[in-house]
Amino acid sequence: MGIDRCWNLMDFRAPAKARLPKPLFHYIDGGADDEWSLRNNTTAFEKYQLMPSYLRDISKVDLRTKVLGVEMAMPFFLSPTGMTRLFHHEKELAVARAAADAGILYSLSTVGTTSLEDVARATTGPKMFQIYILKDRELTREFVTRCKAVGYDALCLTVDTMLAGNRERDQRTGMTMPPRFTLGSLMSFAMSPHWTWNFLRSPDFALANVVHRVDALGGGSMGLVDYVNSQFDRSVTWDDAAWLAREWGGPFVIKGLQSPADAKRAVEIGASAIMISNHGGRQLDSAPAPVDCIRPIRDAVGDQLELIVDGGVRRGTHVLKALALGANACSFGRPYLYGLAAGGKAGVDRVLMLMRAELERSLALMGKTSVGDLGPDDVISKS
């Protein structure tokens, strides 16, 4: 199925699966342990109903919003995802350009396969850099300096990856970074000729932002879990987060929080926003769905933080439900990776186009003319 036959975000999963070697597809698609949180992130939206209001003038619908100090054409943006070169040879640059064309923010991961400088040169759209506090603290400080130098709009600290989650699909498929041909995987690569041709033509899989300071796969293939566990620092505390917020001095996001108590601490250390997230169900299985965390956190922090729902968003109505519950915006990763794998930048463009159409249509059907009009009265929690 071509991308022109994809009519919603999950339609892109099938062509992505057809194009990617098995280990790579399941790296996108999988979660931790029994993958309960992975599934629940999306099904949790079914507990909420939208309440429409009729006989309103909906001849014009405005999706614009402002988050993290930047104007966006729609109330969602693209989450940081690592090693995008795994899924398409156009890498992070294709995604960043698609986001800029759509008027939304793009988030680049520390473990991206394109440098933060190259992304900045490739697009003038709003950008956020997602950062980890690594064992090498000077590398973390260097990231801040580099982001300031090339004009990133926000910095995002991910806090839920002190060690890698138990992603059993990756263990079963033998997923490594960079991908390697083995007797067990040879057939999978042979069945993905388009991907394999581009891999052979351009086999550059360096983790571009860290390769100059860390042996980021320079010594050959290694398991993803092994890399995460070797470089990420389990001793990171709120004091480190406060230090990073001061070093940055601009819009500062903490990604991975889910509890009201942690949200209050984020306010205390100077965060501008939090991304309510369980890492797409890839870290702690049985962690709650982000959409279920919105109201308790909003009640706890009031308007002191912007809340971004990251996880499980697959429909425009999901975004509207999150906004009505008290979020400022949403973000997602898997859907645009499916689109990228299926069709490169054109696939990501279509993902964003379909989401925009769903948002405009659903907002109008609710009787609203602006996403800013959404509030608690527009959503009902099912018992």
Image (tube, rainbow, N blue to C red):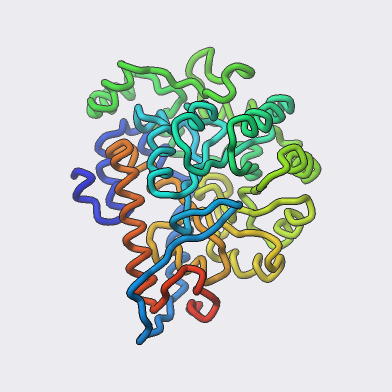
Image location (x, y in percent) of residue 158? 62, 43
**Quarter of the image holding residue 215?**
top right
| Image height of 234 relative to 118, above or below | below
| Image height of 168 relative to 383, above or below | above
Image location (x, y in percent) of residue 271? 71, 51
Q: What residue is drawn where x is 41% and y is 46%?
A: 334
Q: What residue is drawn where x is 33% and y is 38%?
A: 345
| Image height of 55 relative to 305, above or below | below
Image location (x, y in percent) of residue 143? 65, 30
| Image height of 284 relative to 188, above or below | below
**Residue 72 relative to residue 86: left or right:** right
Report the label total.
0
Image location (x, y in percent) of residue 92? 43, 33
Task: Using the rendered image of the protein, determine whether residue 35 is visible from the camera's viewpoint.
Answer: no
Task: Using the rendered image of the protein, determine whether residue 197 is visible from the camera's viewpoint.
Answer: yes
Q: What residue is drawn where x is 29% and y is 56%?
A: 8
Q: What residue is drawn where x is 37% and y is 33%?
A: 87
Q: Residue furthest top?
A: 219
**Residue 182 relative to residue 286: left or right:** left
Q: Quick one: 127 or 192, which is closer to the camera?
A: 127
Q: Quick one: 102 or 20, which is closer to the camera?
A: 102
**Quarter of the image holding residue 294?**
bottom right
